[in-house]
Image (cartoon, rainbow, N blue to C red):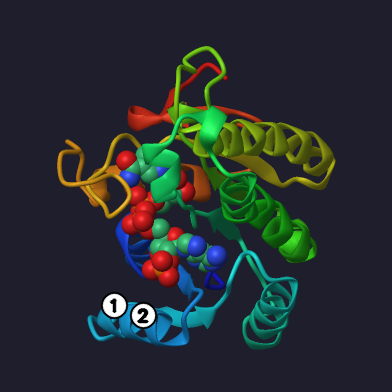
Amino acid sequence: METKVALVTGSNRGIGFEVVRRLAEQGYLVYLAARRPGAAEEAAGELSGRGLAVRPLVLDVTQDESVRRAREHVEAESGRLDALVNNAGVLLDEDRRLPGLELPIEAVRATYEVNTFGPLRVTQAFAPLLVRQGGNVVNVSSVMGQLASAGPGYLAYRSSKAALNMVTRVLAAELKPHGVRVNAVHPGWIRTRMGGPEAPGRPEEGAEPIVWLATLGPDGPTGGFFGPGNRPLDW
Ligand SMILES: NC(=O)c1ccc[n+]([C@@H]2O[C@H](COP(=O)([O-])OP(=O)(O)OC[C@H]3O[C@@H](n4cnc5c(N)ncnc54)[C@H](OP(=O)(O)O)[C@@H]3O)[C@@H](O)[C@H]2O)c1
């Protein structure tokens, strides 16, 4: 059987790094994508040094040109993509500190660029490859994007993930006739630079539902929102 290929954005550290490791351990060739070339090479080297099929890829999800070059590289080198994990995300310091009423619009825009437009931009670019394989798209979202649970604060992060959830639904409907599944996932509250030292979950645990969705077969769900334990979540 031919080797399956996966790409994980923002995977030089945190949850994304563990997703790369787990997919590679399952036999995938995985592109470890990061916006900084040095970070991609260092992190990919750590895993390929352990015998895993992991390749560095420079990909800034906010830059059209960067995404285009990454797509051309994957197409020329591997000729296929079976799983795209839109993992890159930001939670800006101002967004943690300031109420929505005082948050500069520029901070909201910068958050949307990574968390919402990023996954859309990358999925648009790689869709033709995913369609060829009948692959999976996984959008790493958050329960902070659930409309029902919204409270004060974190306006940019919350609304960027709520919008990502809708992007997930629309793309799932559009790609369904082409055999591509698109799902959103909440990894849990995980100890990473974003999650902070108080978070109860380890990155390995956060990777679990993401890897499950990235490796779904043709009968798997699409247009869903899932959390730890692969449990369905309300939007
Ligand atoms: N940790 C949690 O508790 C938690 C909970 C719910 C959802 N999530 C979601 O899980 C995902 C991963 O988060 P994490 O906790 O692993 O965070 P993290 O450790 O802060 O990692 C974020 C990753 O995104 C990358 N990134 C940021 N901007 C980028 C850009 N423009 N292009 C490409 N990559 C970019 C970062 O790269 P640099 O190293 O270059 O900055 C880093 O690799 C995010 O989507 C987050 O919203 C996390």
Name the spot of residue 97 as percent of width and height, x first. 37, 39
Looking at the picture, does residue 76 appear above or below residue 154?
Answer: below
Whether disc 1's CB lies below 8 Å from ligand 1 is answered no
Ligand 1 shown in quarter: bottom left
Residue 21: image tag: none
Q: Residue furthest front?
A: 102
Q: Is the C terminus in the top left, top right, bottom left or bottom right quadrant?
A: top right
Picture quadrant of residue 124: bottom right
Q: Is the N terminus in the top left, top right, bottom left or bottom right quadrant?
A: bottom right
Name the spot of residue 138 as percent of width and height, x first. 56, 47
Compare residues 202 and 24 and report the one nearer the observer. 202
Q: Is residue 150 left or right of residue 45?
A: right
Residue 102 is at least partly visible in this image: yes
Name the spot of residue 24 as percent of width and height, x first. 37, 68
Residue at the location (70% across, 56% down)?
123
- Name which residue type carries label 1: Leu
Name the spot of residue 185 as percent of width and height, x first. 48, 36
Residue at the location (72% across, 82% down)?
72
- For disc 2, the marked residue is 44
